[in-house]
Image: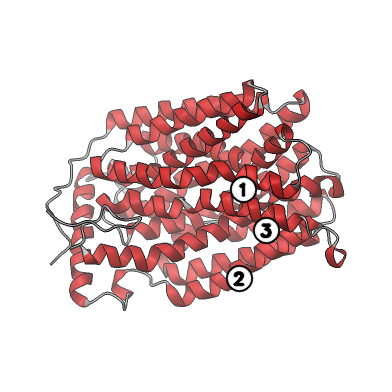
Amino acid sequence: MEATVRDPIRSIPASDVVMRKVFRRLMWFLFILQIASFIDRINIGFAGLSMNKDLGLTTAMFGLATTVFYAGYLVCEIPSNLILARYGARMWIARIVISWGILSAATMFAVGPWSLYGFRLLVGIAEAGFGPGILLYLTYWFPRDYRARAVALFTVAIPTTICFASMMSGAILELDGFLGLAGWRWLFLLEGLPAVILGVAAYFYLPDGPAQARWLADDEKAALRMRLERDHALEGAATAGRGVLRQLASGNVLALSLAYFCLVTSLNANGTWTPLIVREFAAGTSYAMTGLIAAAPALLTIPLMLLWAKSSDRRDERPWHIRLPMLVAAGGWLLVACFAAPGVRFLGLILVSAGGFCAVCVFWTFPSSMTILSPAARPAGIALISSAGIAGAATSPFIVGMLKDLSGSFSPGLLYVVAMLVMSVIFITIVASRQRLPAIPRAVSLQP
């Protein structure tokens, strides 16, 4: 019996040195890039604790400031992924990271609603394609039966970021008045500039694919190429006779796009509104304490994601590993929306975080593992499905904010999020009922 590796990728056979090397060489850096990305995406949620008053923003106007970010992202996402596929990941990922870092830091210069909208729109345009670009990049390196763990290790950066950024952002806001700057202006500056440094590092560190990886020996490259080609052949056989455009226009891609729209509605509500919800049921606490409370659900989510992804890979099962956590997240939002007790609402936020992120870490293995997209269709297909999620992220803040302004409570907006999660479960069920892919033989190793 083979020994196993005692680390976050402990389910990988110790003899499979190629995949261990790929995981350890790439995933830590992609993890850090995702942290930087998500910090600059959600820091507006903490900035809003003091920025809204300074700039005269209503809840709906604040939601719109978040929405315009995703509008810019949405328009440029598919072109960005096609450029990455054509010209290489190293150059394009570096460009994305450097430009969004500069523009996110520049948001500190906002002086009113319209200038804030402009800065957030530019940040969205600059960051467009980062998420789907990395997801596409992972398919260049990881065979099917390692992909959920790779996606999970990348995606786990999101709750890690929420945890880390919640504590850090609360502390930065305490700098209010230092050198004459408001705390929220320090927030955008100090959380934006590190991305510029990471973007420069990405240009020199990331190879475009296994063929350019100097840290893989020739026989290791050959073994990995054979494994990936076998997966591509299996997936290609299942999509034979269907051109790229036909695959992109299929009912399955439409259903997955709608499912992701609904799922991201919940993820975005979690990232955007959790600080304000915590502030509501923990009134009177300091910004730093608000950050600590908001960080706790994300902290508990991190090990659950890794275990859930490992379960999905080992069982080669995707649909239930997506649907069950989405139902858990829906139950969490119901607790937040329908109960006043702080402890019950806090438990709801834990379920929301754990359910949503466990679902999304398996979701992105679904298009390829269910033979919905051939390798040729993946750059555009992944970007198309991701764009639907960005549309969900764009509409969610405005709808929740508007309903909060109209009702004086978060409950109507959160019930809308619950409905979206239920719809997502239905769409995943439709796709799962149509597609089957033969299991990959477990005896195959990457050893040449």
Q: Disc 2 marks which residue? A: 196
| Structure colour scheme | secondary structure
| Residue 124 in sight | no
Residue 217, picture quadrant = bottom left
Amino acid identity at mark 1: Tyr
Label 1 or label 3, whichever comes before in sequence order: 1
Q: Disc 3 marks which residue? A: 122
Along the line of sight, the residue nearer the viewer: 105 or 398 = 105
Q: Are marks 1 and 2 in contact (CB under 8 Å)?
A: no
> Residue at (15%, 58%) from the top-left corner?
445
User: Spatial distance from mark 2 to mark 3, Cα to Cα?
Assistant: 15 Å
- Work out whether 302 lies above or below 327: below
Disc 1 residue crowd, few under 14, some 14–19, many 20+, Cα 10 Å: many
- Work out whether 164 lies above or below 211: above
Q: Which label lies toward us, 1 or 2?
A: 2
Label 1 or label 2, whichever comes before in sequence order: 1
Disc 2 residue crowd, few under 14, some 14–19, many 20+, Cα 10 Å: many
